[in-house]
Image (tube, rainbow, N blue to C red):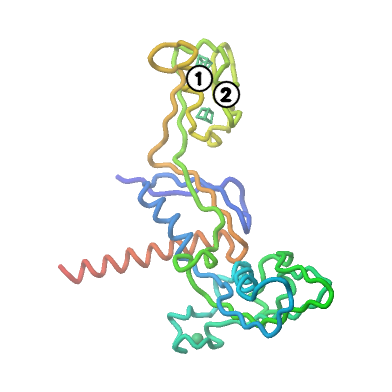
Amino acid sequence: MEKIPSLQFEKEPIDKNSVRFILSNSRSAFANAWRRAMISEVPSFAIEDVRVYDNTSPLFDEILAHRLGLIPLTTGGDNNYLSRAECSCNNEGCEKCTVTLTMSVEGPLLACSKNLISHDPDVQPADPDIPIIKLASDQKVVVEARAILDYGKRHTKWQPTTVCGYKNYPSISIDARCDGCGQCVEECPCGILEISKRKVRVIEDKLDKCALCRLCEKICMNSGIGDMPAIHISTEEDRFIFNVEGCGSVSTEEIMKQGLMFLKREADSLSNEIRALL
Ligand code: SF4
Ligand code: SF4
Ligand SMILES: [Zn+2]
């Protein structure tokens, strides 16, 4: 009988912007589908249109608009907004799909994301101190920006993740030929090996930090041990270590949840299509 997939978090409660966890009893196809769903199928807000009413700064309007577009905006999982594609306003932008933010700043000043005033308090710059433009005295910027809900698959600015990756869980074995010379301990960039009783071993609780670089195997071979190293690096095929970091627009818990919900919707839809053919 197939084992049920399970999750084990490094620390709980999980951090809003960064989470490390182990997915067990799963397959690489599922791990990769979930990773891709978290990156590109979780909706978030980002600025899409900018109207520049005044700009006497050294930056062109286009550069200013580009910088505004890359500021992460908070997007609650239970928001009632629709993406432009789902909305009936025909791409015009309405209160169901669009949030307006304004910025009116005069130098001398370093204008930051906190200078953007949103009409919806739930959709705000995720960090108040992201620099936008440095203005000298007599320089001024007045803009109106419209943020919309969309997906990372359309443009990076809608990706809620800054890091989203996984590796297979490492497995390290040491055979009887190890003489405890310690060369692999010196070579390991992650500092997870130690010598004990004239043999090398993995320091307790540090196995998951192994980077799978195999430098230990290489140095062991170079020590003239023979055709095979005494230390062997492999991976568990059904266990994965995930690292997910968010840009602040959507919480990591929500990113994980919505990624799974997307996969479920896709699987349900495929299942219905297949049933209809039978
Ligand atoms: S380099 Fe090889 S022989 Fe030396 S401690 Fe490491 S595994 Fe053992
Ligand atoms: S594979 Fe790399 S990180 Fe892992 S134990 Fe060997 S040297 Fe260290
Ligand atoms: Zn609309």
Q: Is residue 7 shown left or right of residue 111?
A: left
Could you tell which of marks 1 and 2 lies nearer the N-terminus?
Answer: 2
Count neighbours of disc 2 (C-alpha within 10 A) and say few if under 14, some if 14 to 19, many if 20 or more.
Answer: some
| SS at mark 2 in the image | helix
The C terminus appears in which quarter of the rendering? bottom left
Depth check: 117 or 271 in front? 117
Instruction: Residue at 58% x, 51% y: name it.
Output: 19
Residue 14 % position (x, y): 61, 54
**Which residue is tagged 2?**
187
Instruction: Give the Cα distance between marks 1 and 2.
Output: 7 Å
Relative to residue 206, is residue 78 depicted above or below? below
Query: Would you identify the image quadrant in which residue 107 lies?
Result: bottom right
Q: Which amino acid, by three-letter code, is at mark 1?
A: Ile
**Residue indicated by mark 1:** 219
Residue drawn at x 53%, y 80% as measured from the top left = 81
Mark 1 burial class by Cα count in 10 Å: few <14, some 14-19, many 20+: some
Examine the rendered structure and indicate whether residue 147 appears above or below residue 259: below
Label 1 sits on a secondary structure element that is helix
Residue 111 in the figure: left or right of residue 95: right
Asked whether disc 1 touches disc 2, contact meaning CB atoms under 8 Å apart, the reply is yes
Tell me if residue 189 comes above or below residue 58 in the rendering: above
Question: What's under tag 2, amino acid-wise?
Answer: Glu
Residue placed furthest toward the left: 278
Place of residue 132 in the rendered image (x, y in percent of width and height, measured from the top left): 70, 68
Q: Is mark 1 within 8 Å of ligand 1?
A: yes
Considering depth in this image, is 130 or 42 the residue closer to the camera? 130
Name the image quarter holding residue 238. Answer: top left
Q: Residue at x 34, y 66 (%)?
A: 266
The reply to whether the residue tagged 2 has its Cβ within 8 angstroms of ligand 2 is yes
